[in-house]
Image (cartoon, rainbow, N blue to C red):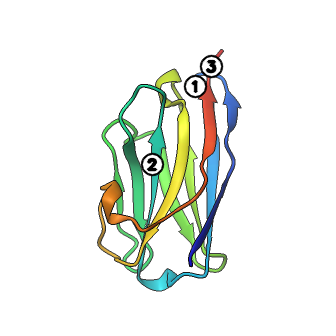
Amino acid sequence: QAQLVESGGGLVQPGGSLRLSCTVSKFSWDVATIGWFRQAPGKVFAGVACISTKYGVTTYADTVTGRFTISRDDATNTVYLQMNNLKPEDSALYYCAAVKNPTARLWRYQYDYWGQGTQVTVSS
């Protein structure tokens, strides 16, 4: 059973930055897609960004394009989400997810394994 552990959430002021990490274990890292999703109270569960561990292709939601960057470290089976110019509407519980499909997109039902989530709060 795959295990995903997120870290890096916290409280930040508008315009600030955070970097989330997701370390994946017990999983076929080489042929997968790792994604970040978020859930805010009263809002739709949404895809944020994903990356193919085989092809390196990245996909971003329109709401974060130009502000967030997803990357991976194959040596440590870790995916990062660098979040810059954060806005209050980015506040949410952020989840990391994985699927054994290197061409998956930002559709939550494609993903089989999920982390516990890390809270991001953007507030002054």
Mark in front: 3 vs 1 = 3
N-terminal-most mark, 3 or 2: 2
Q: The disc labelled 3 sits on which kind of residue? A: Ser
Q: CA distance from mark 3 to mark 1?
A: 10 Å
Percent position of residue 43, x then y: 39, 29
Residue at numbered disc 2: 37
Quarter of the rendering containing residue 105: bottom left
Name the quadrant of the N terminus: bottom right
- Residue at the spot 48% in from the left edge and 31% down from the top edge: 40
Name the quadrant of the C terminus: top right
Residue at numbered disc 1: 15
Crowding at dot 2, Cα within 10 Å, few <14 / some 14-19 / many 20+, comes out as many
Mark in front: 2 vs 1 = 2
Percent position of residue 7, x then y: 69, 52
N-terminal-most mark, 2 or 1: 1
Tell me if label 3 and label 2 are in contact, CB under 8 Å: no
Does 43 sit above or below residue 77? above
Q: Secondary structure at mark 1?
A: loop
- Residue at the spot 59% in from the left edge and 22% down from the top edge: 14
Percent position of residue 119, x then y: 63, 39
Q: Secondary structure at mark 2?
A: strand
Front residue of this view, candidates 30 and 96: 96
Quarter of the rendering containing residue 104: bottom left
Picture disc at residue 123: 3
Q: Secondary structure at mark 3?
A: loop
